[in-house]
Amino acid sequence: GRDLIIELLLYQKQYLNAIQTTCPWILRYLSTAVVINKSSRRNVMLDLVKVIQEESYTCRDPITSFIEDLYVNFDFDSAQQKLRRCETVLATDFFLVACLKDFIENSRLMIFETFCRIHQCISISMLAEKLNMDATEAERWIVNLIRQAKLDAKIDSQQGHVVMGTQTTSPYQQLIEKTKALSFRSQMLQLNVEKKKKA
């Protein structure tokens, strides 16, 4: 369902236009779907950030502000504050309350990934503060994350640091990823053209 919501609201032009002109508050639900959906988040996030930036003057929501702070401003302190507000918003929103745990977990992962792209050596205590966790819980969370995601990182418990390895994507892998994105977009355009012909 989340893939279909993202496809419908973000890549169907008429729905995106309706959101932008009439109901920008729906960006909250679209943003939540993108954050929770791990499979296509990296590719979709760029498109979502563009829409959020275009609509930032009409609708200010903690969830969209969190994404903007994290991916546009790289303001981790503000993103952390917005994440606390997002938790309150999700807990009180009837349609999103079931997504609260997944949203918080994936948001922490997004903060961690973005922070690691910028820094080589990260203090666990500082990272715990950014993720709204205590130091031991954050260290366990990072260890599990390194195991599950197979990140090139090591934990120096004596110093209390996470040391990131150099992760370089080969040019061939970059080309493959761009080709996949172009293929998906061309299929979506083809479907839109076929729907217009039928109408």
Image (spheres, grey):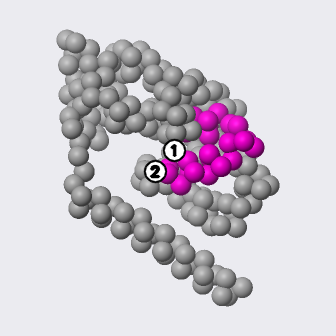
Q: Nearer the viewer, residue 36 or 41?
A: 41
Gap in angstroms between the C-alphas marked 1 and 2: 7 Å
Mark 2 surroundings within 10 Å by alpha-carbon count, few (fewer than 14), some (14 through 19), many (20 or more): some
Does residue 174 appear anywhere in the picture? yes
Q: Position of residue 59 (x, y in %)?
A: 73, 41
Q: Residue at x 53, y 55 (%)?
A: 47
Question: Could you tell me if the residues under marks 1 and 2 are in contact, i.e. CB atoms within 8 Å?
Answer: yes
Residue at (30%, 63%) from the top-left corner? Answer: 175
Mark 1 packing: few (<14 Cα in 10 Å), some, or many (20+)? many
**Bounds of the magenta segment:** 45-67
Residue closer to the observer: 107 or 172: 172
- Under circle 1, the secondary element is helix
Q: Which residue is mark 2?
A: 41
Q: Please, what secondary structure does the residue beneath circle 2 have?
A: helix
Which quarter shows the C terminus? Answer: bottom right
- Residue type at the position of mark 2: Arg
Q: Residue 41: where, in percent of width, then height?
A: 46, 50
Quarter where residue 128 is shown: top left
Q: Amino acid at mark 1?
A: Val
From the viewer's perspective, is 132 left or right of 117? right
Residue 176, given in percent of the width and then of the height, sits at 30, 64
Quadrant where the N terminus sits is: bottom right
Residue at image location 52% in from the left, 34% down from the top: 73
Q: Looking at the rendered structure, which numbered label has been put on residue 35?
A: 1
Q: Is residue 63 above or below residue 19?
A: above
Question: Quick one: which residue is furthest to the top in this view?
Answer: 158
**Whole-percent x, y for residue 161 in the image:** 26, 19
Residue at coordinates 28% horizontally, 40% vertically from top-left? 148
Quick check: 58 above or below 128?
A: below
- Whether residue 57 is in magenta: the answer is yes
Q: Residue furthest right?
A: 22
- The dominant secondary structure in magenta is helix
